Image (cartoon, rainbow, N blue to C red):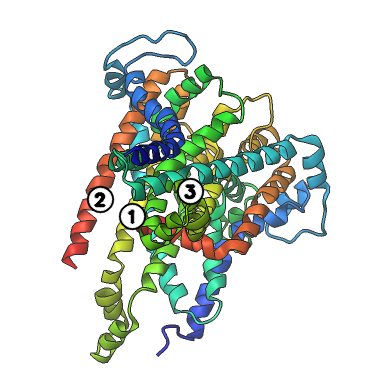
Amino acid sequence: MKKSESGLGLTVVGLLLAVLSFFPVYFSLISAFKSNGEIMRDPVALPTGLRWDNFVYLWEHTRYPAAFLRSSFLTLTSIALIILVIPIAAYVLERKKVRFSGLIYIYFIAGMMIPFQAYMIPLFRQLKVLGLFGNMAGPIVIYVAGSIPFGTLLYASFIKGIPKEVEEAAVIDGCNTLQTFWKIVFPLLTPCTASLIILNGMSIWNDFLMPMLVLPSSQAKTVNVEIFAFVDQYASRWDVVFAGTFCSIIPVLIAFVALQQYFVKGITAGTVKG
Amino acid sequence: MKEKMRFDTMAYLVILPALLLYTGFLICPALSSIYYSLTSWDGLSPQMKFIGLDNFAMMFQDPRFFNALKNTLLLTAVVTVAENLLALLLAVLVDRVKYFKSLLRSAFYIPVLLSGIIVGFIWTIMYNYNFGVINSLLAAWHLEFLKVDWLGRPESALFSIMLTLTWQWAGYYMVIYLAALQGVPQELTEAARIDGANRFQQFWRITYPMLAGAVTINLTLALIQGLKVFDQIAVMTDGGPGFASETLTYIIYKVAFADFKQGYGTAIAIVLFVLILILATIQINILRKREIEL
């Protein structure tokens, strides 16, 4: 007896709900190719043709391209640092049992309970004092620091599941801690790393409040902040805002389609282990 | 001995970057927010004036704070329940269909990927009174009398935001329920069916108890997420009309960065943190107890 049932009715209900659920996304994607008039006259209809002028305007007359680059840079750099800093720390805390390692582990995990809003005001002043306010270093250190609690938890629980013999063999072959980790253990943690990259990458790309407040208003900020500004500034140019929306959804959709499996694993690992 | 020392030094060196970043950019500001909440700092002046608990006293006389507290609790309660009911329904559905399984899962999951700003913007336009999709459809179906200025009226603004949040996040919780459903052994429901249990009994007596862990996780995550909503409100209503859709996170932002009362803003942030802690703890305790009974 297979678990799945072929019930046609169920499938039809499912497809209807799926259409309903996907509709807002579909609506924003097609609107990017419409003129302002078309969007207002008949919001549901397909565009009359593939018009690219919204994108041309977006690319030539707004700060959007710079914002897109900035978002990409912030996301990629933060992720690279997160992967450089967290796994090895979690490994040492979990496996090496140096003095205070248990305490440090609990200290790292405790941060998970602190919401960003609870510390943002002192944080911003601190960035100013340290000269990190208004440049990209500010968001990057905040993202890396903010991902330490969950990242440590996730890696530590994955590392527990790796048999110790693997590492012992490497040590006998003359590897030190760093070599053992990067050459032997880290490759075994690939599913965990993929999950962490996806979860953090998504939340950094989608972040709004922090970059809005921390990066200077005279320059392009991030994709989300620029779209937010558009909504005010171009209140009568929905077409251009939709083009911006299109450009920030497409990379996410591509990543999702390519890495679907890891997205699902990331969520379930993140919650079941958390 | 010397070997061990060198080894330990290296281990500490490897932990150090994480330790410094975490302490410097999370724990330190979090701890100093306690001090900030006891000052009348405006965010600009170099000196902070210590005023003791005045901010908290002010808060308990501030109708705007209580309004935001009420909105936050209402939104969180509604959205947590709605998201989870919908998510459970979708998970059961996706688990059961034979064809289009992954297509359906993706369609329900895609809204989760979008940023709060994008989602807020899309729905702002869908809710538009004159040319929004929702009112256009109502007009097309000759239901003009149902047309409402969804975000522009105090009675419907918060509700409209809740609907958007439910749409966006149900897919996230669905994935977790789906993973739990796939862990339910087929033999159990099969045995129950043979014993004469109907569909509903099978679900309620066998499947649902097996989902208890996922329920705990999902309700807790939804609760915390609900208490922290910000981006969607920023785009869709800016807390309005009037103060109709202001939440705690929203007045923290407004008070701190528009009214330049950062001491007061931090005090509200501390209340929010304590609220999250208390509600999440209560909820987890109740749900865990249920898990054990099952």
In contact (CB < 8 Å): disc 2 and disc 1: yes
Observer-nearest residue: B218 or B78? B218
Q: Chain of mark 3?
A: B
Q: Is residue B287 above or below residue B94?
A: above
Q: Is residue A71 above or below residue A190?
A: above
Q: Amino acid at mark 2?
A: Gln
Q: Quadrant of the N terminus of chain B?
A: top left
Q: Residue at x 38, y 19 (%)?
A: B263
In contact (CB < 8 Å): disc 3 and disc 1: no
Q: Residue at x 31, y 85 (%)?
A: B187
Sequence-first disc among 2 and 1: 1
User: For the residues marked 2 and 1, what is the alpha-carbon distance in whole angstroms?
Assistant: 8 Å
Q: Amino acid at mark 1?
A: Leu
Q: Which residue is mark 2?
A: B283
How far across and how far down the image is residue A193, in percent? 50, 54
Asked whether, in this view, residue B45 is left or right of residue B205, the answer is right
Q: Chain of mark 1?
A: B
Mark 3 vs mark 1, foreground winner is: 1
* Residue B150 shows up from this direction: no
Mark 2 vs mark 3, foreground winner is: 2
Observer-nearest residue: B169 or B36? B36
How far across and how far down the image is residue B141, in percent? 60, 64
Looking at this rendering, what residue extends furthest in the front direction? B2
Asked whether, in this view, residue A57 is left or right of residue A178, the answer is right
Looking at this rendering, what residue extends furthest in the left direction? B293
Q: Which residue is mark 3?
A: B160
Q: Residue at x 81, y 59 (%)?
A: A48
Other-residue count near label 2 (Cα within 10 Å), few / some / many at <14 / 14–19 / ≥20: some
User: For the residues marked 3 and 1, what is the alpha-carbon distance in whole angstroms?
Assistant: 21 Å
* Numbered circle sitting on residue B219: 1
